[in-house]
Image (cartoon, rainbow, N blue to C red):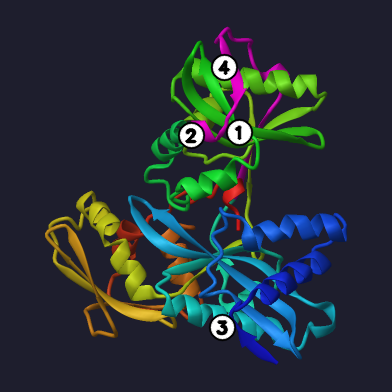
């Protein structure tokens, strides 16, 4: 069996056919049309230099795709390889095909300058390739009886391609500094608008946008960015509740970051908040290139140090993982990164999965250091709390890989 990249139109057709066979819950031809967008659509982020296919006697029997994105870590940006289209023909499963494909794409991502990789996957499978949970899914649920009517005068209009600059402005403002979110370009907005978004208008003025749809008993708000004024926030909730009642649904569910203005407003009303944590499965990530990643976020690390008790201290921290090592030097409130293994008074040795959780802010550092394969030298606890504080990393649903 040969593991290689997509090299021809024939490979493309066979990959699409493989998808349609493996993901044919909605019928073969429906899946064929849907999955062809993944490979050929003008908005696709498929990185053909990193994607791998398994070929047996001229037939594509396995595929793992890499979609290239820029992801926020606070105010810094890193390169993230989103994993999608993981497919192996049933007759070739449990024969090590997926393992060989993942080995290939991880090597390819390292070669082509990626810092981390993320995916959304089934439980008890992707850990064997070094992926571990790194995001928490949150829902804020409310009902019509929990809110007083408002007279906001807001209305909705379906967004079009001409509205992309407005959408992008609200998105970038709302997500500035929000770890986990993607840096969207025009190509991404073309993809995003394949799912209907609405502008929120007050008179003729645009005050934000929203995307929602009904599923079962709930109306779900999957994306939201509006001016953070209480009257506008209340008006948006009222518009959504009106639609909830019109469609005879029982509740309104917001899949939004818990640190967003809307979440803050809802928590002053009657609502319930649910956080979904997973031991395995769901949103998972791994490091690809540790020194490069730490260097890319050195600006954000410096900003964190400047606001901490370490602002005036000079320290060196050596970080060692199975995905690379680096030396972090703190001086005058700035953080500099040097690749390679180094000796230093402060040391952290850990699996790359642990460092991934630290970088993205998934859980408290001291909790993440409780793993069996974690070793430290010196009093690194407080420094790691300053460098990698627990956050609320988030990725909007439409950007799931």
For the residues bearing labels 1 and 2, Cβ distance under 8 angstroms: yes
Label 3 sits on residue: 104
Taking the image as shown, residue 206 lies to the left or right of residue 296, namely right
For the residues bearing labels 1 and 4, Cβ distance under 8 angstroms: no
Mark 1 vs mark 4: give the one in front: 1
Q: Earlier in the sequence, mark 1 or mark 2?
A: 2
Label 2 sits on residue: 167
Residue at x-position 52% and y-position 22%: 233
| Alpha carbon distance from label 1 to label 4 | 17 Å
Taking the image as shown, residue 247 lies to the left or right of residue 47, namely right
- On the image, the x and y values in percent for residue 264 come to 49, 30
Task: Read off the magenta span.
Answer: 137-163
Q: Nearer the viewer, residue 19 or 235?
A: 19
- On the image, the x and y values in percent for residue 78 come to 39, 61
Is disc 3 surrounded by few (<14), some (14 to 19) or many (20+) residues within 10 Å?
some
Q: Earlier in the sequence, mark 1 or mark 4?
A: 1
| Alpha carbon distance from label 1 to label 2 | 9 Å
Label 4 sits on residue: 235
Is disc 4 surrounded by few (<14), some (14 to 19) or many (20+) residues within 10 Å?
many
What secondary structure is marked by label 1?
Answer: loop
**Quarter in which the C terminus is drawn:** bottom right
Label 1 sits on residue: 197
């Amino acid at each position: 069996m040969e593991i290689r990249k997509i090299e021809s139109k024939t490979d493309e057709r066979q990959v699409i056919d493989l998808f349609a066979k493996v993901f044919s819950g909605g019928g073969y031809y429906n899946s064929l049309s849907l999955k062809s967008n993944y490979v050929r659509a003008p908005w696709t982020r498929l990185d053909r230099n990193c994607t791998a296919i398994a070929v047996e006697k001229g037939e594509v029997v396995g595929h793992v795709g890499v979609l290239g994105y820029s992801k926020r870590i606070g105010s810094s940006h890193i390169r993230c390889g989103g994993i999608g289209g993981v497919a192996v023909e049933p007759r070739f499963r449990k024969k090590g095909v997926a393992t060989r494909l993942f080995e290939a794409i991880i090597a390819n991502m390292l070669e082509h300058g990626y810092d981390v990789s993320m995916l959304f996957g089934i439980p008890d499978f992707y850990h064997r390739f070094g992926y571990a949970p790194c995001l928490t899914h949150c829902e804020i649920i409310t009902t019509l009886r929990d809110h007083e009517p408002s007279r906001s005068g807001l209305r909705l209009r379906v967004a079009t391609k001409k509205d992309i600059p407005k959408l992008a402005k609200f998105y970038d403002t709302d997500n500035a500094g929000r770890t986990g979110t993607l840096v969207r370009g025009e190509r991404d907005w073309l993809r995003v608008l394949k799912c209907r978004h609405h502008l929120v208008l007050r008179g003729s003025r645009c005050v934000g946008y929203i995307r929602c749809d009904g599923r079962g008993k709930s109306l779900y708000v999957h994306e939201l960015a509006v001016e953070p004024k209480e009257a506008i926030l209340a008006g948006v909730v009222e518009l959504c509740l009106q639609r909830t009642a019109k469609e005879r649904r029982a509740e309104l569910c917001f899949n939004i970051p818990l640190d967003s203005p809307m979440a803050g407003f809802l928590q002053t009303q009657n609502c319930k908040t649910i956080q979904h944590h997973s031991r395995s499965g769901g949103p998972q990530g791994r490091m690809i290139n540790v020194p490069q990643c730490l260097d890319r976020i050195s600006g954000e690390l410096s900003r964190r140090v400047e606001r901490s008790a370490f602002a005036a201290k000079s320290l060196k921290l050596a970080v060692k993982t199975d995905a690379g090592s680096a030396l972090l030097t703190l001086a005058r409130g700035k953080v500099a990164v040097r690749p390679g293994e180094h000796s230093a008074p402060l040391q952290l040795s850990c699996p790359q999965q642990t460092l991934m959780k630290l970088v993205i802010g998934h859980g408290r550092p001291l909790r993440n250091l409780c793993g069996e394969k974690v070793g430290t030298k010196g009093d690194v606890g407080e420094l790691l709390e300053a460098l990698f504080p627990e956050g609320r990393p988030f990725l909007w649903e439409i950007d799931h890989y």
